[in-house]
Image (tube, grey):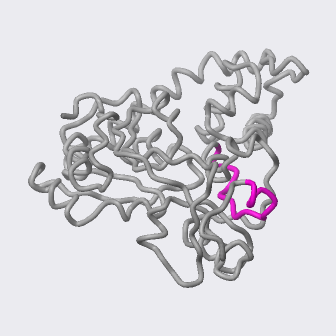
Amino acid sequence: MDVDTRLLRSFTAVCEEGQLTAAAARLFVSQPTLTKQIRQLEALLGVELFERSRRGMTPTQAGRALAEHTGALLAGWDDALRTTRAAAAGQCSVLRVGFEGGIINLVTRSTLADFARRMPGWQVELRQNNWFDPTSGLATGEIDLTLWHGPPWLVEHYNAAVLGQEARVAALPAGHRLAARAELDLEDLADEPFVAIPHEAGHWREYWLAAHELGGRPVRIGAVAHNSDEWLAAVVCGQGVGFAPETMSRLAARDDVAYRPVRGLSPSQVGLYWPKDRELTPAMAAFVRSCRVTVPFGGGRAGAARGVA
């Protein structure tokens, strides 16, 4: 029987946290997604793994038996993946850098040229992040670094080289009733339908719906997009509004989309991120330095990464 390791990670988190809410937050997924994964694992194994009550989730005898093995199994698999991918990347002298949406516009030809001078013979492979994986491939070792716009608390979960801050702006179809305004209040958009990213994106979905600034108020979803092109198309077609990095209004401008600043919406922290348990390699450090001298945020020295001058 083949079991997705993602299901085992979800099982382990629920065992350790004792409740779905805390486990979902730890995994950066929504609670409904986590519930679905646990039930899927139970169906695959043909056993009930948890006793559910108002106080939380308690492993059954079968659940406890499984939990005795999952920790070592997952740790071994993670080590195998990282070692294999690191060996392949090192052999080919390739640095794999993930990016999300319009943030790739911050990386220019100058960035890659500077990196090439620092690391002769190395290449940078740019990969757009998968919205169905909240870690963008960092957890599995598919990429070495990722460029993210995100909330400041991300540095609690990842190593980070902060490059600077960037405003989040509203994106509306050009004919929208609010598009005539030069600036919006967050409250102006509270009742609008939004174009959302998938539930599987976990905390990223909430972040780009401004859930924190809206105080947890339910958001009306007009469409769900599975990549940045779908997201922009849904906005253009009037299926909803959304929030985007200010960079998009300058580098991805188009006549059928109106980008407007929003009072009450916190800015994004822009940076390069990698797992807490991974050391910074010379190639990774060189790419961080290259971004510091070419990405237009004034250096971001306050967020200097460990081991990066």
| Relative horizontal placement of residue 84, taking residue 290 as reference (left or right) | right
Residue plotted at (78% across, 63% down): 192
x, y percentage for residue 196?
69, 59
Part of the protein shown in magenta? 187-202
Residue plotted at (39% across, 34% down): 80
| Residue 184 appears in view | yes
Q: Nearer the viewer, residue 182 or 290?
A: 182
| Relative horizontal placement of residue 90, taking residue 227 as reference (left or right) | left
Query: Does the segment drawn in magenta span residue 214?
Result: no
The correct choice, above or below, for 214 with respect to 237 in the image is above
| Relative horizontal placement of residue 21, taking residue 145 as reference (left or right) | right
Query: Does the segment drawn in magenta span residue 192?
Result: yes
Q: Among all residues in the image, which is located at the extreme right?
A: 54
Q: Quadrant of the C terminus?
A: top left
Q: Nearer the viewer, residue 140 or 170?
A: 170
| Residue 40 appears in view | no
Instruction: Tally the numbered discs.
Output: 0
Residue plotted at (64% across, 25% down): 12
The correct choice, above or below, for 158 with respect to 264 in the image is above
Q: Quadrant of the N terminus?
A: top right
Residue plotted at (37% across, 45% down): 164
x, y percentage for residue 258?
59, 75
| Relative horizontal placement of residue 153, taking residue 47 as reference (left or right) | left
